Amino acid sequence: MTAAEAFNARLRSVPPGSLYLVAALPALWLIAKVMTGQAGADPVKALELGFGRWGLKLFIAVLAVTPLRRLAGINLIRWRRPLGVMAFVYVVLHLATWLVLDMGLLWQQALGDIVKRPYITLGMVAFLMMLPLAMTSNDTSVRRLGGTRWRRLHRLTYPAAILAAIHFVLQGKVWMPDAVLYLLIVASLLLLRRIRAPR
C-alpha cells in the first residue's frame, strides 16, 4: 500500500460532516478576538478581512482537491462539498460585516461603492457566481440538474476563485504579500487542473 493509499484509507474513517465544525472554529476565534478587544484599532476591518481571508483559503482548498487526486493520488472528493459550503459561509460573513458594520446598512452608499470601486465590483461578481454553487451543493440538485449540467454549472468555481483572489489583492492601497500569494496559488491550481496524471 502506498502512502497516498494509506492516507486515503485513514480519511475514509472520518465523516466529512465533521469538517463543518472544524471550519467554523476560525470564525469563532475572530469573533472572540473582537469581543475581547484583541482585534486591534479597527476591529470591524479586522473581522471583515479575517472572514475574507478564510473564505479564500477554503476556496483554495476546494481547487486543490482535483490536482491532489490526479498528481498525488490523495482523494479528498468527499471533503470538497463541505469545503465549498464553508467557503461560501465565510464569504457571506465577509459581505455581511461590510454591509452591516462597515457601511451601516446605507444601501445607496454601498451600491455606489460597488459601482465606483473596482475591487468591490469584482468581489460582488465573485459572490454572485458563488450563489448558484452554494444553492446546488446538495444531492437533490445533482439529481434534478443531471450530472453533466451540474458539473457545467459548477465550473463557475474557477472564475469566481480568480475574481475573489484579485478582489483581495486590490482591496488595500498597498498590495499585501499574502494576498498576492493567494492569487498565485489560485492561478497555479487552475493551471495544474490542466495537467493529467501519467497513465
Image (cartoon, helix red, strand yellow):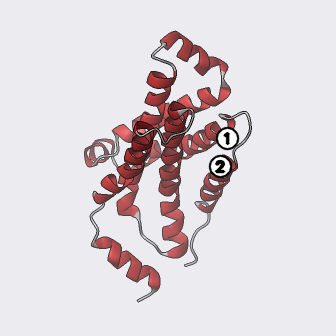
Q: Residue furthest top?
A: 108
Q: Name which residue lies at 31% across and 53% down.
A: 21
Q: Where is residue 100 in the image (x, y as percent from the top left)?
A: 44, 22
The amino acid sitting under disc 2 is Leu
Q: Can residue 150 be seen in this view?
A: no
Task: Please give the label number shown on residue 128.
Answer: none
The amino acid sitting under disc 1 is Val
Q: Name the residue under label 1.
A: 169
Please tell me whether mark 2 sits on a helix, a strand or a loop.
Answer: helix
Q: Where is residue 136 in the image (x, y as percent from the top left)?
A: 34, 41
**Label 1 – label 2 distance at C-alpha:** 8 Å
Q: Position of residue 133 (x, y in %)?
A: 41, 41
Q: Which residue lies furthest to the front in this view?
A: 37
Is 20 left or right of 41, judged from the image as shown? left
Q: Name which residue lies at 41% across and 81% down.
A: 5
Q: Can residue 123 be seen in this view?
A: yes
* Res. 120 image quadrant: top right
Q: Mark 2 points at which residue?
A: 183
Q: Are marks 1 and 2 in contact (CB under 8 Å)?
A: yes
Residue closer to the observer: 1 or 119 = 119
Q: Name which residue lies at 56% across and 45% down.
A: 161
Would you call the spot at circle 2 few (<14 residues within 10 Å), some (14-19), or many (20 or more)?
A: many
Q: Which residue lies furthest to the bottom in this view?
A: 1
> Which of labels 1 and 2 is toward the front?
1
Q: In which quarter of the image is the C terminus?
A: bottom right
Is 147 left or right of 125, judged from the image as shown? left
Residue closer to the observer: 118 or 149 = 118
Whichever of labels 1 and 2 marks the residue nearer the N terminus, that label is: 1
